[in-house]
Image (cartoon, rainbow, N blue to C red):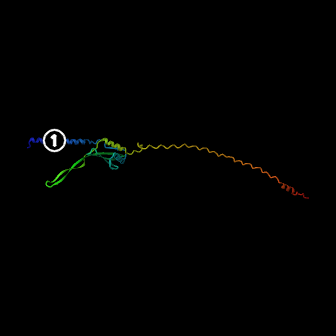
Amino acid sequence: MIPSRRIAPVLACLGIVVSLAGCGRGKADHVLVRESFNSDNTYSRNFEVAPAAACEAARRALLSQGYIVARADAAAVEGSKNFQPTEESHEQLDLRISCVAQDDHAWVFVSAVQDRYALKKSATSASVGVGVLGSVSLPVGSSNDSMVRVASVTVQDADFYKRFFERLAMYLPKPSGKPSAQAAPPPPPPPAPPAPVAPAPEVAPEVTAPARLPAPPPVTEPAPSAASSQAQDTKPQDTPLP
């Protein structure tokens, strides 16, 4: 039979263990309560474009903010960005975007995971052989530094995702039929053709009378000479026939 004075400490220890287990379970339940699967659109948006166009806009949104895109196709985009808050800590933000078709629209789902790394230092030791004592390990001043992941959490900030979707919407193709805000202004209309001018009436060419030639000088017959008059006088006269 176990003495009662020994049972009491055992029961007290069991009570402490049970209470600690209850505290740990309550903390875990508190974390799970946040995962309520509510109906808000923190991680998704609907766009009136094809899934391929939505993923292309997501790729451009990541590139515009300095992310390294590791995957980009018509269905998914993955990118990462590195941060260094302090000299001994490092953070990496990974974004995964999925584009799903629904009728003629596209649902875009995004999830961001933040990984935190810390610098871990480990000292090295060297063994020195001594004739009498054998091998003795002596610490040396060198150390190996390495980054170890100490935390990984999904980003749940609604404002973060809101800013991402606003940036994504800037790179979506503009719907047809609506003028683009950044499109060039339309060219001015061509100038109206000049009014036709009535043709001028044709003017008949002026007929000019031919120039009159000067009248020829009168022809004067030369006066008969003396020889010719004598010849006429000596011409035999016709005698009448009997």
Q: Quadrant of the C terminus?
A: bottom right
Residue lying at the far bottom in this picture: please name it.
Answer: 242
**Left or right: 71 in relation to 8:** right
Give the percent coordinates (x, y) of residue 23: 19, 41
Say what amino acid the circle numbered 1 marks: Ile
Residue lying at the far right in this picture: please name it.
Answer: 242
Question: How many numbered discs, if any?
Answer: 1
On the question of residue 9 being in view, the answer is yes
On the question of residue 39 being in view, the answer is no
54 or 145: nearer the viewer:
145
* SS type, badge 1: helix
Residue lying at the far front in this picture: please name it.
Answer: 131
User: Residue visible at 12% across and 41% down?
Assistant: 9
Determine crowd level at label 1: few under 14, some 14-19, many 20+ residues with C-alpha closer than 10 A: few
Give the percent coordinates (x, y) of residue 76: 33, 48
User: Residue visible at 22% across and 41% down?
Assistant: 27
54 or 219: nearer the viewer:
219
Kindly indicate the quadrant of the structure image that contains residue 229: bottom right
User: Residue visible at 18% across and 42% down?
Assistant: 20
Q: Quadrant of the N terminus?
A: top left
57 or 33: nearer the viewer:
57
Kindly indicate the quadrant of the structure image that contains residue 134: bottom left
Give the percent coordinates (x, y) of residue 186: 45, 43
Write down the residue under mark 1.
16
Give the percent coordinates (x, y) of residue 106: 35, 46
- Is residue 237 positioned above or below 173 on the image? below
